[in-house]
Amino acid sequence: MATVDLKGLGKTYQGGVRAVEGVDLTIADGEFIVLVGPSGCGKSTILRMIAGLEAVSEGEVRIGGTAVNRLEPGERDIAMVFQNYALYPHMSVRANMSYGLKNQKTPKDEIARRIAEAARILQLGDYLDRKPRQLSGGQRQRVAMGRAIVRDPKAFLFDEPLSNLDAKLRAELRAEIKALHRRLRSTFIYVTHDQVEAMSLADRIVLMNRGRIEQIGTPMELYDRPASRFVAEFIGTPPMNLLPAESPAARALAQGARLPQGAAWLGVRPEALTLARAGLRGQVGLIEALGADMLVHLVAEGHDAPLILRLHGTARLAEGQEITVAPEEGTLRAFDGAGQALHPTAEPVAAGG
Amino acid sequence: MKRVVFRSKWLPYVLLAPQIAITLIFFFWPALRAIESSFFIEDAFGFAREFVAFENYARLFNDAGYLKSFRTTLVFGLGVTALAMSIALVLAVAANRVLQAALTYRTFIIWPYAVAPALAGVIWFFLMNPTLGIVAYWLDLAGYEWNHYQNGDQALLMVTIAAAWKQISYNFLFFLAGLQSIPKSMLEAAAIDRAGPWRRFWTITFPLLSPTTFFLLVINLVYAFFDTFSLIHATTQGGPADATSILVLRVYQTGFVGQDYGSSAAQSVILMGLVIALTVVQFRYVERRVNY
């Protein structure tokens, strides 16, 4: 168990492609950090630099306070779970888990004890003598986690571990990983492109965009107070509604409240819009009934793209119906022309920023 | 695969006939004739022959020269296989790490495979020629006397090297393909599991290469046993004093030079048994091991 610090971390590939730039991140001991972002944003590269599988071009990686830039992956005392499991196909589950311990000359009875412990935690007891090919995808990923647990490393690294699994199994293993973190209280660094995984697992999310950190914060901070349009649109399904601040629709939503200086975009979450007497008028378009709630596409006057509303599943609406919606208090977000979030001005106006 | 159902009963047999005919005429018939001939002693002009049952075989296994040839073949075959495979593996591992100009490197290394076996032999024959050869000259400078015209062990070593040299490129291609099919993340996982490069190779890479290695083992043995005839024939002709006379060469010498068809046929049948055994082993073992 240890802290992990990244200081001005950067990666430039041959040919001058900058995959990661100026990443500063302090990960506390026992914290569950999720690096999330669209593909090609550099999140995996950061993880591989922490693991030592990728050379660091600039900056520093510290694990437990010690700079590890020059250490081999095996000397960093970390464990990694890969997307394609990376189990050794010619070894049994038991041999897969003991391989790392044998390499560090752990006594035999200690190895047996740790494997028994890991097998108990992950319910792998019945599979110890099987080969990886005799296991299902979910079981294989559990073995990969077992291989990490037995090593008792300073930090666990996960590189999109659930991407190869189907949706149901993904949800199941997500809960298991979270429970594992609770039990071990070790430092977890987890890379994914799936914002649902990020939201449900992370203590803190690091949202990456084009090799840079876009925002660091707890899942609710990112959801509630996105630092930029990019964050607002990446986190949350469906994403935040965004309207040009000067459009009639945006004015109708703001209901005359003063927007922060320089606001170019106005954003509002689908569930923050409710039926009201005054506000934005529009016609109900497509209705997606999801059971617990429904997504309503609202074709508003003076705005081309439909706004998405998330209403309770029992709401009685019909396509073509005219409705008026207004944002709940303090739920409007404003962004400037460059996409950066604007914070509310001193006056207590309806349009929070 | 698409399953075709023929309406007429005889059409599939007609379509298969050419292939079956070729197999029967060019493979089964000569093989049967060889087995048949091996039970007879024939005079050199083919006028008369006498049925002798297993006498040809019995004589072979009492013939010290034939048994020595068996040993020579074994030493030669294992030598060629070990040399060609180990060098190819080292080169493939090195090439697998090369990132730039990899294609050029691979193209160059494949060239020897295009050289005819007889020519490959002659190249090494000249390189090692005691009076003209550059290798022999270097060995002489190092104080080692090289003369494969007189020293049987040296002659065997020379044909072994020449035969192995030609086979390296073939093995290299297969090893490289095998190495490239090993997922990189597996070796990364091993690196994180504190295995150094050497240990990584022997505990992960080498076991995962085993289907390729086994396939090549059989292919190389078959190559050394059967396809090196022209190489040896063009260089040492089995000499000096039968030191490089491997089994195929002996079949030729007994049959076409010595005109002892019965014995030559018996030797062919023994070789046939050997290659059938190797093929059976290959099919059974490779099928079981190729997917784990």
Image (cartoon, rainbow, N blue to C red):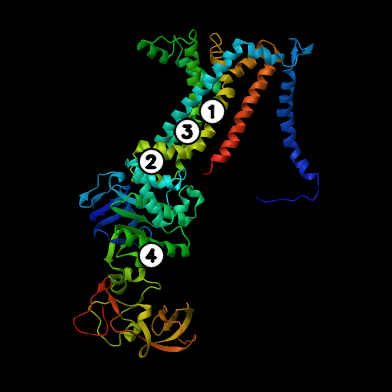
Dot 4, how many residues are within 10 Å of its Cα: few (below 14), some (14-19), or many (20+)?
Answer: many
Mark 4–mark 1 Cα distance, whole angstroms, equals 52 Å
* Residue at the image position 38 percent from the left and 46 percent from the top: A112
Q: Which residue lies under the disc numbered 3?
A: B172
**For this view, does A225 lie left or right of residue B168?**
left
Mark 4–mark 2 Cα distance, whole angstroms, equals 36 Å
**For this view, does A53 lie left or right of residue B22?**
left
Q: Nearer the viewer, mark 2 or mark 3?
A: 3
Tell me the subunit letter for badge 4.
A
Q: Nearer the viewer, mark 4 or mark 2?
A: 4
Q: Are both tags, 2 and 3, on one chain? A: yes
Residue furthest bottom as drawn: A277
Q: Which residue lies under the disc numbered 1?
A: B220
Residue B99's label in the rendered image is: 2
**For this view, does B244 lie left or right of residue B96?**
right
Tell me the subunit letter for badge 2.
B
